[in-house]
Image: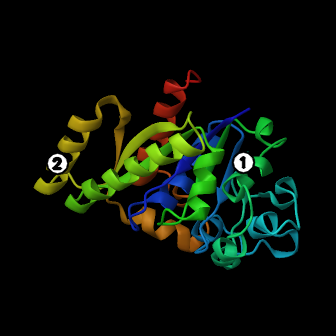
Amino acid sequence: MGKTVVVANQKGGVGKTTTSINLASSLALAGTDVLLIDTDPQCNSTSGLGLASGGGEQGSLYDVYAGRRELADVVQPTCVDKLSIVPASVDLLAVEIELVGMDGREGLLDKALDGIGDKYRYIFIDCPPSLGLLTLNAMVAAGSVLVPMQCEYFALEGLGSLTRTLKLVRGAFNPLLEIEGILLTMYDARNTLSRQVAHEIRRHFGDKVYDTVIPRNVTLAEAPSHGKPVLLYDARSRGAQSYLQLAKEMLNENGAG
C-alpha cells in the first residue's frame, strides 16, 4: 500500500492546491508513481493539470461518492508522466447534503481506495478550505496530513483549529493519523513578520516543519492558468526548484532518497 497524504488547512489561500499539484508532479518526475485526488468542489487541482472539471465521460470523484463509478474507473492521466488524477466536480458541493443520513459516510473514500492504493507510491488528497465531510473522508482514508501554512499571524490561529480537528479524527475514526509535515509557504525573507511566524512555527512543531520553504513566486501563480505544474511551465523558477527540493526531502524522510 502506498503512502496516502492529505493536503489540508481550513484556511484558504495558503497554497494547498499549489502544493498538491507541484509536490505530486515533482515526485512523479523523479520516477515515482503518484495519484492526486481532487476533493475540492472548486476543482483547482483538476484544472491546474489541464483537465476539465467533472472528468468528462469518464466521470469524477462525485460519481464515486454517488455510487455510480469505482475509483479506478475515474482515474485519468495527466500531462506529467507517472502522475494520475481523480478529477473533482462542482457537484461535490452536494455530497454533505446527499450523504447526511448514511451510516459510515465518513469512510466512503477509504473504502473506495481499497484495491487501488497498491498501484501508487504516493497518493495525495487535495482538500477544500473547510473541515466538512469531504475533508473528514480524506483524513479517514489517509495516514498523514501535510499542512501548508502561509507565513502570517492568522495562520497560527488556523493551525490550532486544525490540530484540534486531527485529535478528534484520531479519537473517533483514524487513530493512526499523524502530521506528515508543516510546509511554510509564500515566504518572504525580507519580511520581518514572515521570519517571526516561521520562527514560532518551528519553535512549536520542531522537526515536523520541513526545512524546505516555498517562496512567494509569481511563476507558481501563473502555471495553473496554462494547465501545467510549474516544473513544466518554468523549471528554472524559484518556485519549481523549491518543490523539487521538497520532494527530495520527503523521499529522504520516507527512506526512498
User: Does residue 170 lie above or below 99 as drawn?
Assistant: above
Mark 2 / mark 1, whichever is N-terminal: 1
**Marks 2 and 1, Cα distance to the nearest angstrom?**
38 Å
What percent of the width, then of the height, locates residue 36?
Answer: 66, 53
The residue located at (56%, 49%) in the rendering is 6
The residue located at (49%, 36%) in the rendering is 178
Among the 4 quarters of the image, the one containing residue 186: bottom left
Which amino acid type is shown beneath numbered disc 1?
A: Asp
What percent of the width, then of the height, locates residue 206?
Answer: 28, 31
**What residue sits right under mark 2 in the picture?**
195
What percent of the width, then of the height, locates residue 204?
Answer: 24, 37
Q: Is residue 254 left or right of residue 189?
A: right
The residue located at (74%, 39%) in the rendering is 120
Which amino acid type is shown beneath numbered disc 2?
A: Arg
Residue 6 marker: none
Residue depth check, mark 2 versus mark 1: number of the one nearer the observer? 1
Could you say which is closer to the camera, residue 257 or residue 94? Answer: 94
